[in-house]
Amino acid sequence: MGAKTKRWTGRVKQAAGTLTGNKRLEREGRADRRSAEAVERLAQARTQAGKMIDKAAGVVKGARTRTGGARHR
């Protein structure tokens, strides 16, 4: 199940639990929603980390190009 699907399923469970007074279902829905949100945040962090790595690689490549590819010892 995808994170978005799990988030919406959690919202529905939580609402159903609230409407029916079923605390277990409400807690389960809240847990599903929060875990899906955590997965989404992790995916965003991975994307940002990848962008930062690509940017750093570009800076290093540019520096090596400007110095003629010479390595400092």
Image: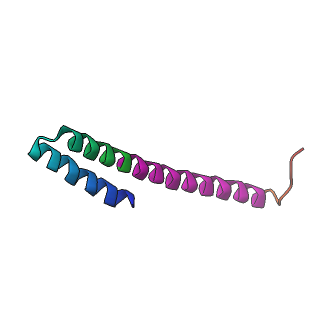
Is 65 part of what is drawn in magenta?
Answer: yes
The span shown in magenta is 37-66
Q: Position of residue 15 (x, y in %)?
A: 16, 49
Q: Quadrant of residue 62?
A: bottom right
State left or right for residue 36 relative to residue 64.
left
Camera-nearest residue between 29 and 25: 25
Q: Residue at x 55, y 56 (%)?
A: 51
Q: Residue at x 71, y 54 (%)?
A: 60
Q: Quadrant of the C terminus?
A: top right
Is 48 part of what is drawn in magenta?
Answer: yes
Furthest-right residue in view? 73
Q: How many callouts does the rendering have?
A: 0
State left or right for residue 68 relative to residue 9.
right
Camera-nearest residue between 8 and 55: 8
Q: Quadrant of residue 68?
A: bottom right
State left or right for residue 18 relative to residue 33.
left
Q: Position of residue 42 (x, y in %)?
A: 46, 49
Q: Position of residue 13 (x, y in %)?
A: 22, 50
SS assignment for the magenta stretch, majority: helix
User: What colour scheme does the image use?
Assistant: rainbow
Camera-nearest residue between 5 and 37: 5
Q: Quadrant of the N terminus?
A: bottom left
Camera-nearest residue between 43 and 68: 43
State left or right for residue 40 relative to residue 45.
left
Q: Residue at x 52, y 52 (%)?
A: 46
Q: Position of residue 27 (x, y in %)?
A: 25, 40
